[in-house]
Image (cartoon, grey):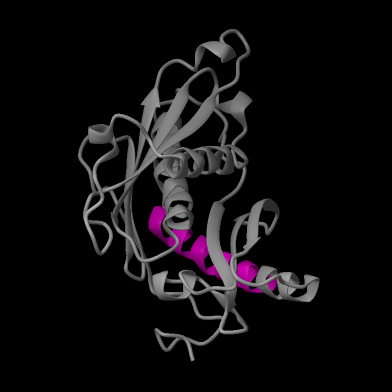
Amino acid sequence: MRPSGRNLSDMRPISIETGVTKHAEGSCLIKMGDTHVLCTATIEDRAPSFLKGTGLGWVTAEYGMLPRATNSRTRREAAAGKQSGRTQEIQRLIGRALRAGVDRSALGERQIVIDCDVIQADGGTRCASITGGWVALRLAVNKLMKAGIVVSDPLIDHVAAVSCGIYAGQPVCDLDYAEDSEAGTDGNFILTGAGRLIEVQMSAEGATFSRDEMTKLLDLAEAGIAQLVAAQKAAVA
């Protein structure tokens, strides 16, 4: 039995509320169980300098956790004077995951920055950030298209992410903190709406895993991603 009482393949309740901030070109508050992340998209009229003259756009991301997002206060990284290695790794992951679903030539020489701020953490914050980040990106691109600034849709497909792992010897979908902290194997799966793989991060946290177990986790992830994509579609409809 999972600590939450969920079945092995069950996702946590998913909620995506859009238009939650006044100024951002796209925004949403995504809730995956008790993990809540505010995602905003900002359109900048020019691309990074390394893309000047290429005609290509760019999507990047920044990620952070509020001090009391967890069960004990974490010092703000700005106060510490630098970002942790974990923060840098996660925001790079979010950026490259979202770029995988973008036609950068159709976007043109501009940049969209996705900010993901974790309000409350209970496992899977990077996955929630990617899933909600896509919704914020979609809303921002819609504004560009409505204004006639972008002619063809630069978003190729949905992008969503879910964590799966081996908990108490069983493959489970959408780990919360209680499971994540005890999982023998932990994996993050990022897929497109069509089921194409973007990135898979898997590691043996306490025990090695077999190829058969990896396949079972991928099967769980595909089913979970389908639910997340359905929630994305409903949010931006």
| Residue at position x 58%, y 14% in the image | 51
Can residue 201 be spotted in the picture? yes
Between residue 134 and residue 4, name the one nearer to us: 4
Residue 237: horizontal and vertical position, in percent?
A: 42, 55
Q: Residue furthest front?
A: 206
- Residue 185 on the magenta span: no
Where is 223 relative to 112, above or below? below
Where is 57 relative to 64, above or below? above
Main secondary structure found in the magenta portion: helix
Q: What segment carries the magenta color?
A: 219-237
Residue 63: horizontal and vertical position, in percent?
A: 38, 42
Q: Is residue 118 left or right of residue 102?
A: left
Residue 215: horizontal and vertical position, in percent?
A: 75, 71
Can residue 192 be spotted in the picture? no
Residue 171: horizontal and vertical position, in percent?
A: 62, 79
Q: Which residue lies furthest to the bottom in this view?
A: 1
Q: In this view, does 138 lie to the left or right of 155?
A: left
All told, the count of numbered labels is 0
| Residue at position x 63%, y 74% in the image | 220
| Residue at position x 48%, y 56% in the image | 127
Q: Which residue lies furthest to the right in this view?
A: 211
Q: Residue furthest top?
A: 53
| Residue at position x 48%, y 44% in the image | 90
Where is 8 relative to 211, above or below? below
Between residue 146 and residue 18, name the one nearer to us: 18
Between residue 57 and residue 164, name the one nearer to us: 164
Where is 2 relative to 228, above or below? below
Location of residue 191 (image quadrant): bottom right
